[in-house]
Image (spheres, rainbow, N blue to C red):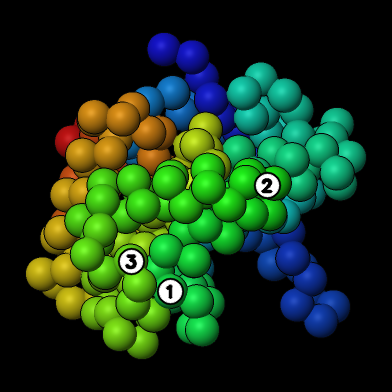
Amino acid sequence: MAVIVEAVELKKTYMLGKVPVEALRGVNLKVEEGEFLSILGPSGSGKSTLLNLIGALDKPTGGKLYIEGVDTATLSDGQLADLRRKIGFVFQFFNLIPRLTALQNVELPMAIAGLSGIERRKRAEELLETVGLGDRKNHKPSELSGGQQQRVAIARALANNPRFLLMDEPTGNIDSKSAHEIIQLVKRLNIEQKVTVIMVTHDQKLAMEAVRTLHMLDGYIVKETLN
C-alpha cells in the first residue's frame, strides 16, 4: 500500500503569551492508503494539533510532514488550499449551516469546487443515501438528531472524493447509540469504499474500532497497538 501521510520528527510550539507550549515534541508516523487509524490520548496530549497539521490547517514549527510524498513546507498558501480540498473534515460539533437543508449542506463544498447544480445534487443525494439519510435530505439541522447531523457532516466531508478523512472526536457530541452507529458507518466506508480514515479520540473503546491505534501523551506517540 502507498503511504499517504508521513510525519518525521514533527514538532509544534505555540506561544501562550510569552510562554512557549510544546504541543508536539517529535512525532513520527506513517499512514497507508485505505487504512483506518485512530489517535488516542487525553486532553492536551497533542492529538488534535497533529490532526490540524495533517489537514494543512496549521504549519509545523519543526520536522517534516509529507502528504502523498509532497513536503507540505514547500507548498504556497494557494497549494495548501488545494491540498485541503483533497481532505474531508469531520468535527465534534458538526459545523452544518443552520439555514440550509441536509442536501444543501452536502452540496456546498461541491459548489465551491465549481460542480454544476445537476452534478452536485446527484452526488449529494447519493451520499445521503450512503449514510442512511436519503429520506431526510430536505430537513434542516434543527430538525435532525445529533447522530443524523453527524451523518450529514460525514456525507459533506466525502462530497469532493477526498483522498482521506480526518475526524476530530466525531462522537463527542452525540449519545452512545448514535456514536455506535456513526463508527459502524465509518468502518463500512473504510472497508467498502477504501476511504482512508484518521480519527482522533480520547475514548479508548472508540479508538479500538480502528485497525491500528497510536497512543499520544505529552506531545509524543508513546505506543502503537493493532486492534
Q: Which residue is mark 3?
A: 137
Residue nearer the viewer, 160 or 4: 160
Q: Residue at x 56, y 30 (%)?
A: 5
- The answer to which quarter of the image holds residue 112 is bottom right
Q: Secondary structure at mark 2?
A: loop
Gap in angstroms between the C-alphas marked 3 and 1: 7 Å
Q: Secondary structure at mark 3?
A: loop
Gap in angstroms between the C-alphas marked 2 and 1: 19 Å
Q: Is residue 226 above or below residue 48?
A: above
Q: Position of residue 137 (x, y in %)?
A: 33, 66
Residue projecting furthest to the front: 118
For mark 2, does the 10 Å Cα neighbourhood hold few (<14), some (14 to 19), or many (20 or more) residues? Answer: few
The answer to whether the residue labelled 3 contacts the one labelled 1, judged by CB atoms less than 8 Å apart, is yes
Q: Amino acid at mark 3?
A: Lys
Identify the mark nearer the N-term, 3 or 1: 1
Q: Secondary structure at mark 1?
A: loop
Q: Position of residue 140 (x, y in %)?
A: 39, 80
Q: Residue at x 26, y 47 (%)?
A: 130
- The answer to which quarter of the image holds residue 82 is top right
Identify the mark nearer the N-term, 3 or 2: 2
Q: Amino acid at mark 2?
A: Ala
For mark 3, does the 10 Å Cα neighbourhood hold few (<14), some (14 to 19), or many (20 or more) residues? Answer: some
Q: Residue at x 22, y 41 (%)?
A: 187
Q: Which residue is mark 2?
A: 113
Gap in angstroms between the C-alphas marked 3 and 2: 21 Å
Q: Residue at x 39, y 40 (%)?
A: 197
Mark linked to residue 37 = none
Q: Is residue 143 above or below residue 44?
A: below
The answer to whether 31 appears left or right of 137 in the picture is right
Q: Which residue is mark 1?
A: 101
- The answer to which quarter of the image holds residue 18 is bottom right
